[in-house]
Amino acid sequence: MHLNRNGKDIDIDPVFDVAFRGVTIENICSDLLNFRSELFSGIAQLRGHLGNIKHLKEIDNDEEVPLHRLLTIFNRFHLVANQLKRRRNNKTPYLIEDEYDVQNLLLAILKIDFDDVRKEDWAPSYAGGASRIDFVLKSEGILIEVKKASQNLREKQIGEQLLVDIEKYKEHPNVSTLICFIYDLDNWIDNPRGFETDLQKCSAKELKVVASVCP
C-alpha cells in the first residue's frame, strides 16, 4: 500500500495502516475514550511488530533460523504440557510421567515446523553397539537429546550421560549441532542456567552444543 505525498509514493507499514487508518480530528473529538483505547492497542501491535523485526535481525544467517525456532519450542513446552492436562468433560488428560512422555509430546510439536523428524540408530567407530539418538533433523543438521530430570536422574547423572553423548556425536556425519533438552518439572536441577552454560562449553569445531532446561 502507498501514500502519495508531493508526487511521491511512500510505503506504509501494513500494521500501522490497520491500527490507525481513518483517524481524523473529528473522530478523536467525538469519541476520545474509544480513540484512547484504539491508540494503546495500536501501540501494542507496533511494539510486537518491531520486536519480531529485531528478533529476525539478530539471526546472522539462515542456518540459525531452525535453532531459534527450536529454542522457542523448548521455552514453551511446559505451557503446552500444562494445557494438555486441563481437558474438558472429564476426558483423560495427557500427563508427563517419564522421559517417553516428554519425547512423544515434543515429537508432535516438532512436526509443526519440521518436515523430517526421525529417530536414528547410529554407532560411532569406537563404540561397541548402536546408540539411539532421540531426534534427528537431517535437513538442518541437528541432533536432539531429551532428558527428564527426576529423583533417580538428577543433575549429576544427566550431566554425565550428556557428556558421553557429546563425545559420541562429534563423530556423527553431516551434523553441526547437538541440542540437549532437559525437562525439569520438579526442579531437581539447582542452577539451570549454570547447567546449560557448563554443557555448552563442551562445544567444539565438530559439534556445537546447545542446552535448554525447561521450565
Image (cartoon, rainbow, N blue to C red):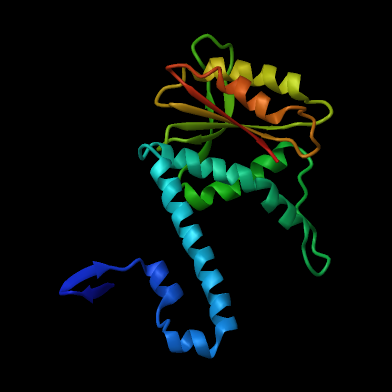
Q: Where is residue 74 in the image (x, y as percent from the top left)?
A: 61, 42
Q: Using the image, determine if residue 54 lies above or below residue 149.
A: below
Residue sitting nearer the eye, 190 or 44: 44
Q: Position of residue 44 (x, y in %)?
A: 54, 64
Residue 108 is left or right of residue 8, and the answer is right
Q: Using the image, determine if residue 24 lies above or below residue 20.
A: below
Residue positioned 70% across, 38% down in the render = 100
As drawn, the residue found furthest toward the left would be 7
Q: Where is residue 139 in the image (x, y as percent from the top left)?
A: 40, 38
Q: Quadrant of residue 19?
A: bottom left
Q: Where is residue 16 in the image (x, y as percent from the top left)?
A: 41, 69
Residue 45 is left or right of residue 151, and the answer is left
Residue 130 is left or right of residue 78, and the answer is left
Residue positioned 51% across, 66% down in the render = 43
Q: How many labels does the image show?
A: 0
Residue 151 is left or right of residue 181, and the answer is right
Residue positioned 58% across, 46% down in the render = 73
As drawn, the residue found furthest toward the top would be 126
Residue positioned 80% across, 64% down in the render = 91
Q: Using the image, determine if residue 106 lies above or below residue 119.
A: below
Q: Using the image, determine if residue 136 lies above or below residue 89.
A: above
The image quadrant where one finds the C terminus is top right
Residue sitting nearer the eye, 207 or 55: 55
Residue sitting nearer the eye, 29 or 174: 29
Q: Quadrant of residue 14?
A: bottom left
